[in-house]
Amino acid sequence: MNEIVLETVGLTKYYGQRLAVDHLDLQIPRGCICGFIGRNGAGKTTAIKMMLGLLKPTAGSARLLGCDCQQLTPQIRQRIGYVTEGHRLIGWMSIAYLENFQKAFFPRLWDGKLFAEMMEYFGLSKKQKIKHLSNGQRAQVSLAITLAPNPELLIMDDPTLGLDAAIRRQFLEGMIQLIMRQGRTILFSSHILGDIERVADRIIVIDKGQLRANCSLEEFRKAVKKVKFSFADSIPENIDIDGLLHCRRQEKDCEMTLVRTSDEQIAQWAKKNNAERYHIVEMNLEDQFIEFTELTERKRLFKWEENQQ
Amino acid sequence: MALWIQISAGSNEPIYMQIVSQISEAIAKGEISAGQKLPAMRKLAAELVINPNTVARAYSELEQAGLITTKTGSGTFVNDPKLRTIDAANINILAERMDSIVARGINLGINASDLAAMFRGRVDSFINKSQKREKENERDST
């Protein structure tokens, strides 16, 4: 088993009466890129802020690189990179000034050559002032100042929110370049599941503050299935198939979302219940995520009235 | 000869399978021939902007299928077709894929014998093309 670089135990946060993060138990092994996914308001940002010691948990704890998140020493902080949503940087600084300012927090670790190369790659001059940069350029600067100290653990909270496809790709490139170095680990949240699929080898899914999945991406891709069954007479009253997450009934057809149900189990169930036919619907990661996080029977947004005059 | 791999994120097919099927196809078509070296995993990962483990996963799948061999220290190479073994499970998967093509043909209104003739024709032209390519490769290398 790999060494664990990030661990949370019963991590919980209440905002007044509202439960934002609910007893999160996580372990992230060294060397992976972990995609952190969940719908808006699922608790991703709150969880990340608690992990970094920026927000006090109501209960539970987190450890980063073996150190309690509420007692992170400057020595430990130096080994952690953090990118926030929106890339808020100090406007009056020039890029050169910002570099010097940041560098001071990472004595010995700062890779000035890498920073300069990235500025050149992005077509930015160090003389430019932060406040005159576009959102995309500010994100590029933020990526460069995060990667320059060569972080051992990189945590990014929806770093590509609102960015164009080209800049998003640069973030992915940055992550791949970092992970190629020995012993680096990345945790990043995003709503762009195509990006997650490209670079992540593990995923964490949270929904309404609760952990729903923490596994390899491949395992998740294999585990979540949608199957459509058609019955000659009627759908069985009691659906007793292993791994059933939810079931939508429509006349003689039903559509089930299953987790970790094998193809053999599906075939057996279909036979036992006299299904006329069935087929396993192919899904991409996005479809799987939607099916997986939707627990209630789907309410259709539009209802097509067929017999309308 | 260059190896072109196109990744489509958000597809139903997992990324490692996209790599597996594209490399397998390139080998079958003779675009890359026996003994040829595949790109290093880390280099390919950086080029395609995907996780290095995904490339490793694809290569190990290709190795299990007997299409390539990784020699420690020197790289990954395409196997000689004569040395490949035929795996029953893979044949089953292939048969299932053929079924879906047959179903499409029938839905288009093509009768069984025409469909079979069409399939035969495609196989012949595929083999001709890849043999032609192999000869060209031999000529290039001598």
Image (cartoon, helix red, strand yellow):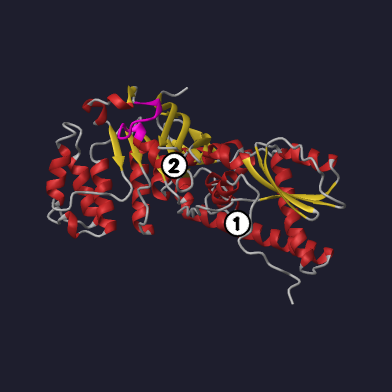
Q: Residue furthest front?
A: A17
- Mark 2 residue crowding within 10 angstroms, few (<14) / some (14–19) / many (20+): many
Res B142 visible: no
Instruction: Please identify the quarter of the rendering in which residue A4 is found.
Output: top left
* x 77%, y 60%: residue: B103
Label 1: element kind: helix
In-image side of A2 versus A184 (left or right): right
Disc 2 or 1, which lies upstream in sequence?
A: 2
Q: Chain of mark 2?
A: B
Amino acid tagged 1: Ser
Residue A106, above or below A94: above
Which circle marks residue B51 in the picture?
2
Residue B1, position as x, y percentages in the image: 46, 54
In the rendered picture of this protein, how many numbered marks are placed on residues? 2
Q: CA distance from mark 2 to mark 1?
A: 32 Å
Q: What amino acid is labelled 2 in the image?
A: Asn
Between A43 and B3, the residue placed more toward the observer is: A43
User: Which numbered marker is on residue B130?
Assistant: 1
Decide which of A39, B76 is in the foreground and name it: A39
Vertical placement of A2 versus A308: above or below?
A: above
Please tell me whether residue A63 belongs to the stretch shown in magenta.
yes
Q: Are marks 2 and 1 in contact (CB under 8 Å)?
A: no
Residue A291: x and y, percent? 60, 47
In the rendered image, residue A259, in percent from the top left (x then y), is placed at: 64, 39
Q: Quadrant of residue B82?
A: top right
> From the viewer's perspective, is the residue at label 2 or at label 1 nearer?
2
- Residue, x 50% and y 41% (percent of image)? A208
| The magenta segment | A50-64
Look at the image and tell me in which quarter the C terminus of chain A lies.
Answer: bottom right
Q: In terms of secondary structure, where does tag 2 sit?
A: loop
Q: Residue A122 lies in magenta, yes or no? A: no
> Within 10 angstroms of label 1, few (less than 14), some, or many (20 or more) residues?
some
